[in-house]
């Protein structure tokens, strides 16, 4: 599989809300399909199917195996810190748009289970800024993402809070496009 085919496979694999949840869950923990199923409230067969797709796309690694009732269960982990190409994945505009829609659709679902009364940050910006400012914004967004991922712990670990960070930062053309 070429680098381009691999990046397209990754993009398509993440363009599903359940698989995005799985990637987040497996950032801070090594879990089996049964454990993922319990945590996300889906069947083990469904969890197993989606985990296999994510693994085949190179987005999960097998972190180990355990014996469960005489059988072997794989433990999966999301290696969020793996080196990734810096540029957009070489995929079709349709694939990139599908991925953007999945990310956008996740925000209202997560917002519905937010801790009300807690500090939060909401920003929507379609602005003209100097290139240096834009590069700094991208660097800060990357730092925030890396900090959150590096600090991820297994679900419900004592002393932790559940948090969401959804960032879509991209440079716009100078033209308005019809919706």
Image: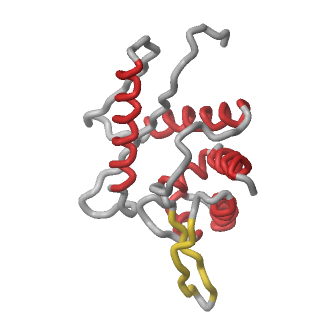
Q: Residue at x 60, y 8 (%)?
A: 175
Q: Residue at x 36, y 55 (%)?
A: 150
Left or right of 54, for residue 157: left
x and y percentages locating residue 56 in the rendered image: 69, 62
x and y percentages locating residue 146 in the rendered image: 38, 48
The colour mode here is secondary structure
Relative to 161, say whether 70 is above or below. Answer: below
Q: Quadrant of the N terminus?
A: bottom right
Left or right of 169, for residue 85: right
> Which is nearer the eye, 79 or 131?
131
> Which is nearer the eye, 68 or 138?
138
Relative to 57, say whether 112 is above or below. Answer: above
x and y percentages locating residue 54 in the rendered image: 64, 58
Q: Quadrant of the C terminus?
A: top right
Farthest residue to the bottom: give it.
Answer: 70
Q: Residue at x 30, y 51 (%)?
A: 161
Q: Residue at x 42, y 20 (%)?
A: 124
x and y percentages locating residue 26 in the rendered image: 49, 61
| Picture quadrant of residue 158 | bottom left
């Amino acid at each position: 599989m070429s680098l381009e085919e691999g990046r397209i496979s990754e993009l398509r694999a993440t363009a599903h809300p359940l698989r995005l949840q799985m990637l987040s869950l497996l950032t801070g923990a090594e879990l089996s399909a049964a454990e993922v199923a319990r945590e996300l409230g889906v069947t083990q067969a469904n969890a197993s199917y989606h985990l296999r797709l994510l693994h085949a796309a190179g987005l999960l690694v097998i972190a180990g195996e355990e014996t469960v009732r005489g059988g072997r269960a794989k433990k999966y982990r999301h290696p969020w810190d793996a080196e990734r190409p810096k540029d957009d994945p070489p995929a079709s505009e349709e694939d990139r748009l599908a991925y953007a829609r999945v990310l956008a659709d996740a925000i209202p679902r997560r917002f519905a289970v937010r801790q009300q009364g807690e500090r939060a940050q909401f920003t929507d910006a379609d602005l003209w800024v100097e290139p240096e400012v834009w590069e700094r914004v991208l660097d800060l967004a990357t730092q925030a993402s890396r900090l959150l991922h590096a600090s991820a712990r297994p679900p419900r670990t004592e002393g932790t809070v559940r948090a969401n960070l959804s960032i879509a930062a991209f440079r716009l053309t100078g033209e308005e496009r019809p919706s």
